[in-house]
Image (tube, rainbow, N blue to C red):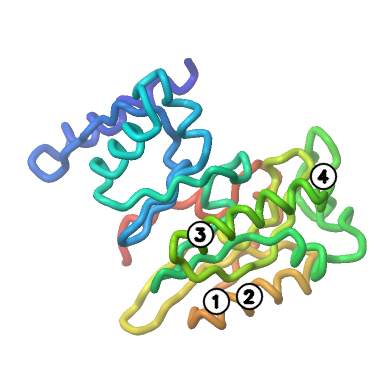
């Protein structure tokens, strides 16, 4: 109920910019973050199937066909993935290459005392933030990498630190990507108290040919999102 007005935003914008913008409503149930789209594919996280099967569509095949038709992309349905928006654990960087988050690298490059990272975040969480490096969680992230590779994508792993609460990630794929001529630029989150982790993630992006512009997200991750979740670029001034 608190978000009842959200469904009217598209039509409101189209009415205000009549002739310039067209609003189309999908019959499906989803959050925007349930999809990750590049120039040829749309990655779809598992909960889209759970939300829609026997509600908006009768079969899995009908759902995938509907998504493909509406987004004009081939559909890559992830059978196993973290219960979070796709942009928190993977990023498509062009040339059929995806960066997939890896808790093992987060553990390798993270600080000795994770409490320092939690304390650096402004305010207090409901519960103390703790990293989740359990084999079960690692297996879920590894499954995403395998599924992307099976779909024909080159997979590069990048550090991440998922929280035990399942939502507060130290992530380096929830970014803003920009292109200025031949220059590729990424606005990349960093976290105070995690210098080696930040550096390891930065190197991954630089090796893909990106100029890195760091953005402090220490006080952001505890709210279950990160940089891309906060920003919508309208135009360059």
Q: Residue at x 16, y 39 (%)?
A: 22
* Quarter occupied by residue 113: bottom right
Disc 3 secondary structure class: helix
Real-space Cα separation, disc 4 to disc 2, in angstroms: 23 Å
Mark whose residue sits in front, 3 or 4: 3
Q: Residues within 10 Å of mark 3 (few under 14, many from 20)?
A: many
Disc 4 secondary structure class: loop
Real-space Cα separation, disc 4 to disc 1, in angstroms: 27 Å
Q: Nearer the viewer, residue 237 or 223?
A: 223
Marks 4 and 2 in Cβ contact (< 8 Å): no
Q: Percent position (x, y) of residue 76?
A: 42, 50
Single out the residue that lies furthest toward the right. Answer: 113
Marks 1 and 2 in Cβ contact (< 8 Å): yes
Single out the residue that lies furthest toward the top. Answer: 1
Real-space Cα separation, disc 3 to disc 2, in angstroms: 22 Å
| Residue 185 in the figure: left or right of residue 12 | right
Q: Which residue is disc 4 drawn over? A: 129
Q: Residues within 10 Å of mark 4 (few under 14, many from 20)?
A: many
Q: Percent position (x, y) of residue 18?
A: 11, 37
* Quarter occupied by residue 103: bottom right
Residue 202, labelled with which disc? 2
Q: Which residue is disc 3 drawn over? A: 148
């Amino acid at each position: 109920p608190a978000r009842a007005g959200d469904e009217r935003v598209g039509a409101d914008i189209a009415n205000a910019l009549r002739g310039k913008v067209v609003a189309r409503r999908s019959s499906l149930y989803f959050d925007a973050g349930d999809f990750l789209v590049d120039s040829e594919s749309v990655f779809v996280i598992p909960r889209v199937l759970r939300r829609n099967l026997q509600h908006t569509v009768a079969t899995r095949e009908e759902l995938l066909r509907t998504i493909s038709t509406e987004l004009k992309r081939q559909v890559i349905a992830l059978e196993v993935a973290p219960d979070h928006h796709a942009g928190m654990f993977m990023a498509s960087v062009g040339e059929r290459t995806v960066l997939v988050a890896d808790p093992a690298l987060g553990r390798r490059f993270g600080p000795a005392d994770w409490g320092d990272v939690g304390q650096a975040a402004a305010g207090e969480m409901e519960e103390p933030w703790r990293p989740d490096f359990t084999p079960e969680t690692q297996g879920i992230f590894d499954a995403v990498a395998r599924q992307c590779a099976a779909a024909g994508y080159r997979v590069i792993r990048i550090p991440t630190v998922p929280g035990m609460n399942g939502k507060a990630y130290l992530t380096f794929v929830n970014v803003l990507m920009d292109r200025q001529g031949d220059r590729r630029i990424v606005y990349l989150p960093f976290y105070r108290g995690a210098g080696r982790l930040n550096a390891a993630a930065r190197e991954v992006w630089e090796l893909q040919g990106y100029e890195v512009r760091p953005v402090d997200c220490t006080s952001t991750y505890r709210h279950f999102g990160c940089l891309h979740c906060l920003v919508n670029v309208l135009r360059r001034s």
